[in-house]
Image: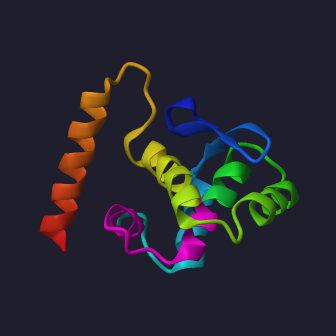
Amino acid sequence: MSDLITHRAFFGDSERAFCLTDAMLAELERITGLGVGAMYFQLVNMAYPAETLREIIRLGLIGAGTAPETAKRLCDTYAANRPLAETFPLAFEIMEARWTGTGTDQTPEDVDRAASADFEALSVAA
């Protein structure tokens, strides 16, 4: 697990680590049938299937070292049948950590500039 792409946040009953490693990203692409760029584009444009949010959270937990059974239980308990406004921010932050990194040397302005440039590149490609 790489700290550069690991997001830490409170989920369920404690703070947890989430990391979309290469293997977890490949699994997410397989499950959704979308490449990571298309999936990120859907998230940015609020055009995602609801189940995608839970899968991002579940696979992020597994990628950070949570046992698969525990990750599923946590998602079933704390992400299922919840308002999307609760699950979207966490799922997006997990994906954003993989997309732009979580480097502590980055300022919020650096992250914003990188995200804007990524969005513009995706808009031109679409």
- 57 is higher (above) or lower (below) than 97: below
In the figure, 48 relative to 54: above or below? below
Please tell me which residue lies in front, 45 or 115.
Answer: 45
Q: Among all residues in the image, which is located at the extreme top? A: 105
Is 42 included in the stretch rendered in magenta?
yes
Instruction: Measuring from the top left, give residue 78's x and y in whole percent.
Output: 75, 58
The x, y position of residue 92, in whole percent, is 47, 54
Residue shown at the point (80%, 42%) measured from the top left: 13
Q: In front here: 124 or 85?
A: 85
- Tell me what residue is drawn at x 70 percent, y 50 percent: 61
Q: Is residue 41 left or right of residue 56?
A: left
Is 84 a magenta residue?
A: no
The residue depicted at 37 percent of the width and 42 percent of the height is 100
Q: Could you tell me if residue 72 is visible in this image?
A: yes
Q: Which residues are magenta?
A: 38-56
Q: Quadrant of the C terminus?
A: bottom left
Q: How many marks?
A: 0
Q: Main secondary structure of the magenta part?
A: helix
- Horizontal side of 21 relative to 107 (left or right) equals right
**Is residue 30 in sight in this rendering?**
no
Check the image and name the residue furthest to the left.
124
Q: Quadrant of residue 19?
A: top right
Q: Position of residue 112 (x, y in %)?
A: 26, 38
Left or right: residue 42 compared with residue 31? left
Tell me residue 65's x, y (percent).
76, 43
Left or right: residue 89 versus residue 106 is: right
Figure quadrant of the N terminus: top right
Using the rendered view, name the quadrant where residue 37 is placed: bottom left
Question: How does the figure colour the protein chain or chains?
Answer: rainbow
Q: Quadrant of residue 11?
A: top right
Which residue is depicted at the point 49% across and 47% down?
93
